[in-house]
């Protein structure tokens, strides 16, 4: 008897090995079907599980602080992630603003996120005039009011 998958001679009634049986049966009737999702707003088909497609999803910079807040323990995470992207593209994270240390530079808000009202847009909170790149030591000093930065 010949194996239906690899066409080699076998004494078994159907397949020569388990891998040939699996390959043959999975091609014949696959277990998983490819899913497709659709955008809740416009109905276009997407490949990801997000509710909105890229064209319907609002840019984070257009949202207000209240709309960007998340319910997890780090509620300002989305705002900080956006600030990091803005600072990176502007070149603020190349070196520390105070000491020019360039191995590890963090994004720092000059005016804290908490001090803005809930109706403030993220683009205002993460404006380049409110962001500065600091090394971890100077960031800690700034957060604890031990370092004063010159106003730009």
Image (cartoon, rainbow, N blue to C red):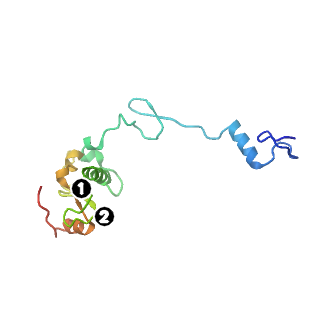
Residue, disc 1: 92
Neighbour tally class for label 2: few under 14, some 14-19, many 20 plus, Cα within 10 Å: few
Image-quadrant location for residue 149: bottom left
Q: Is residue 12 left or right of residue 145?
A: right
Quarter of the image containing the C terminus?
Answer: bottom left
- Label 1: state its secondary structure: loop
Q: Quadrant of residue 121?
A: top left
Residue 33 x/y as whole percent: 59, 37
Please state the horizontal and vertical placement of residue 102, each as a whole percent of the image: 28, 64
The circle drawn on residue 34 is: none
Q: Which residue is mark 2?
A: 104
Mark 1: few/some/many CA within 10 Å (<14, 14-19, 20+): many
Residue 61 lies left or right of residue 50; in this view the side is: left
Percent across and percent down for residue 3 are: 81, 41
Residue plotted at (26% across, 43% down):
61
Q: Which residue is most to the left?
A: 151
Closest to the observer, 131 or 111: 131
**Rendered image quadrant of residue 115:** bottom left
Residue at 22% across, 67% down:
138
x, y percent for residue 137: 25, 69
- Quarter of the N terminus within the rendering: top right
Label 1 and label 2: CA atoms lie apart by 12 Å
Number of dots carrying numbers: 2
């Amino acid at each position: 008897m010949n194996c239906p998958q690899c066409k080699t001679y076998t004494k078994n009634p159907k397949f020569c090995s388990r891998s040939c049986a699996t390959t043959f049966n999975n091609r014949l009737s696959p277990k998983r079907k490819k899913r497709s999702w659709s955008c809740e707003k416009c109905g276009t088909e997407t490949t990801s599980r997000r509710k909105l497609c890229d064209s319907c999803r609002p840019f984070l910079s257009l949202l207000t602080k209240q709309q960007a807040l998340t319910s997890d323990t780090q509620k300002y995470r989305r705002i900080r992630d956006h600030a990091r992207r803005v600072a990176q593209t502007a070149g603020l994270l190349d070196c520390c603003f105070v000491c020019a240390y360039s191995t590890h530079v963090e994004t720092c808000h000059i005016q804290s996120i908490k001090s803005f009202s809930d109706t403030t847009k993220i683009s205002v909170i993460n404006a380049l005039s409110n962001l500065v790149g600091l090394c971890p030591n100077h960031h800690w000093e700034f957060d604890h009011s031990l370092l004063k930065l010159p106003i730009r």
